[in-house]
Amino acid sequence: MLLSILNNFFDEDLRIEEKDIKKHGEGKINHTFLIQTKENKKYILQKLNLNNFFSSKKQLEIVLKERLKVYLEIKKNLKKFNFILASLLPLAKNKKKYFLKYKNEYYVLFEFIEHDKKVKKTPELSFEALKYLGNFHKLSKKYNLKIRYSLPHFHDTKYFLDKLKKFKKHQDFYLVQKEFSFLMKETPKYFFSKTENILIHGDPKIQNFLFQNNKVKTVIDWETMMMGSNLIDLGDALRSFAIDNKFKNNFSKEIFQAGVNGYNEGLGKKINIKTCKQAFNLLNLELIIRYLIDFFEEKLFSWDNNKYKNLKEHNLYRVRSRLTIYNNLSRNFSK
């Protein structure tokens, strides 16, 4: 099937077999495959999992066309600043179209960018990634980059909090009443006051930064880009880099501070540490709220069936372990 899909992007025979197509990653937004031809050319094929976000195929395709158009604008406008994005390939028979609809699924194809396969979370890497992110935000504002459509309710913490309230009558609510009450009281403390809307990435986790020799080569997975506060990206990136179960108490203050320093350098102005902590805390709490919602709904996150008997049990572990980490953060920050 994937060979049939790939043939739509090329005029000539690719000279590849199914065995030349390898799974390269899987997430809520896309499934990724690595293709390597006999000539050693590499490509990334993505199946976009956008059907869950839109009830109408027409609306989905309008959103997808715009996102790919904006992606190409970013690539063109920011290249002179050494901001490199992977080349997006059009269809062979329609050079103005950059996605393929195949059996009600949507596919895009990129040229592969070489990068280090394994990276370790360090202060140096955090500094470089957040510097890159801050620079993107600066250029996004300078060039007035915009997008009309976002994935529905993406990073809408207030929406998730309101949605969580609807489960108070759920039969399993008693199991998480303590966690529910804490989130309802704690989360509003960190809501942003009025902030400037710019084009942001939306999902700047460490896996979406590609590094080479401890420098950022590029950022991938732009399907989540949206108009929003730069603090959303900042908080999410800091969360991804500074929290890890390999760190003492699951948190690295050094990596957090390096990320803040890098971001400020890239942005070209200083965001005070209090605001950085606010963004970091809000994005942590948002993730916990989403885990708790999925505790009730059991339909969003994956689960480890070797350790947990079902997704509900796994999500309950996620909620409680993340809250333990969160409650330790205030002690880490005060040291």
Image: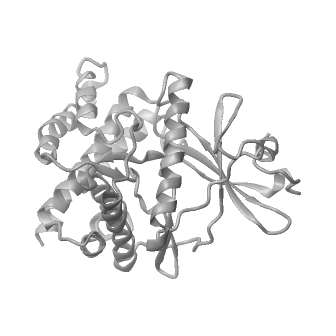
The x and y percentages for residue 215 are 46, 78
109 or 66: nearer the viewer: 66
202 or 88: nearer the viewer: 88
The color scheme shown is one colour
The x and y percentages for residue 95 are 70, 47
Instruction: Please name the residue shown 30% across and 19% down the image.
Output: 170
Q: With 142 as the anchor, is 23 left or right in this view? A: right
User: Is residue 235 among the parts visible in the rendering?
Assistant: yes
Q: Quadrant of residue 58?
A: top right
The x and y percentages for residue 238 are 30, 62
Q: On screen, 317 above or below 243?
A: above
Instruction: Please name the residue shown 66% across and 28% down the image.
Output: 104
254 or 125: nearer the viewer: 125
Q: Quadrant of residue 325?
A: bottom left
Q: With 108 as the anchor, is 203 left or right in this view? A: left
Q: With 135 as the anchor, is 34 left or right in this view? A: right
Q: On screen, 18 above or below 139?
A: above
User: Is residue 302 among the parts visible in the rendering?
Assistant: no
Instruction: Please name the residue shown 34% across and 77% down the image.
Output: 123
Q: Quadrant of residue 113?
A: bottom right
Q: On screen, 181 above or below 168?
A: below
